[in-house]
Amino acid sequence: MTERRNRLTTAFRIILAIPHLILVGGPLGAALSWSASQPGEDGSASAGGGGGGLIGLAATVAAVISWFAIVFTGKQPEGLRGFCEFYIRWRVRAVAYTTLLRDEYPPFGEGDYPAEFEVDLPTLPRNRLTVGFRLLLAIPHILAVWFLGIGWFFTSIAAWFAILFTGNYPRGIYDYGVGVLRWNSRLEGYLLLLYDDYPPFFLR
């Protein structure tokens, strides 16, 4: 969405996004906080996930329970999986709005929105080995998203000024933001145990 943008809602975007930020967190916050909440090799888990807001905290608990369920039974409880999918779909819409990628105000919970997250059901039985070491396997992506997120922070600020003064979102900056959101969302889905396929390393 690089056509003429709404300067008024852009100017107050952070304030307008506060309810969503409280519930599902801000950009990158959840992906990087999963590392503090995933069970370690000894099966222990520390409190974390606050970067994903209040609902993100609940999704973290669901992911931890799912981790134990998959490791010991090879299956993820359907209700826990559904809740994590609900959370990440809401989160993608909220982050797209917060980072100025869209002007439409996102719905609370489910609802139609131009930014969506879709994931296919994983192959059964689940891969217990990759689930057991999920956090370790995700470290390269966590580091990559962390560095990309620094760039996203500064490009989003640049976009904010560009929209306020010109009414347009520079195409190159926009494409970068969309790419980081996609990468971050794939990482969060992987850490939430929604699938076992290893995420690709690219901004598409």
Image: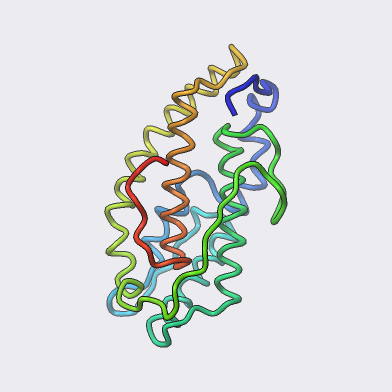
Q: Quadrant of the C terminus?
A: top left
Q: Position of residue 156 (x, y in %)?
A: 49, 29
User: Which residue shows up at 40% across the image and 53% down it?
Assistant: 32
Q: Position of residue 150 (x, y in %)?
A: 37, 36
For this view, does 163 lie left or right of residue 125? right
Q: Eyeballing the image, is 44 above or below 19?
A: below
Q: Eyeballing the image, is 163 above or below 53?
A: above
Q: Quadrant of the N terminus?
A: top right
For this view, does 147 lie left or right of residue 90? left
Query: 126 or 88: which is nearer to us?
Result: 126
Q: Position of residue 114 (x, y in %)?
A: 64, 41
Give the quadrant of residue 172. top left
User: Which residue shows up at 47% across the image and 76% down it?
Assistant: 66
Query: 199 or 42: which is nearer to us?
Result: 199
Query: 172 or 164: which is nearer to us?
Result: 172
For this view, does 64 lie left or right of residue 82? left
Q: Eyeballing the image, is 50 above or below 112?
A: below
For this view, does 22 lie left or right of residue 177? right
Query: 150 or 50: which is nearer to us?
Result: 150
Q: Residue furthest top?
A: 165
Q: How many numbered tags mark residues here?
A: 0
Q: Eyeballing the image, is 1 above or below 7?
A: below
Q: Position of residue 135 (x, y in %)?
A: 32, 65
User: Which residue shows up at 65% across the image and 35% down it?
Assistant: 15
User: Which residue shows up at 49% across the image and 53% down it?
Assistant: 51
Q: How is the image coloured?
A: rainbow
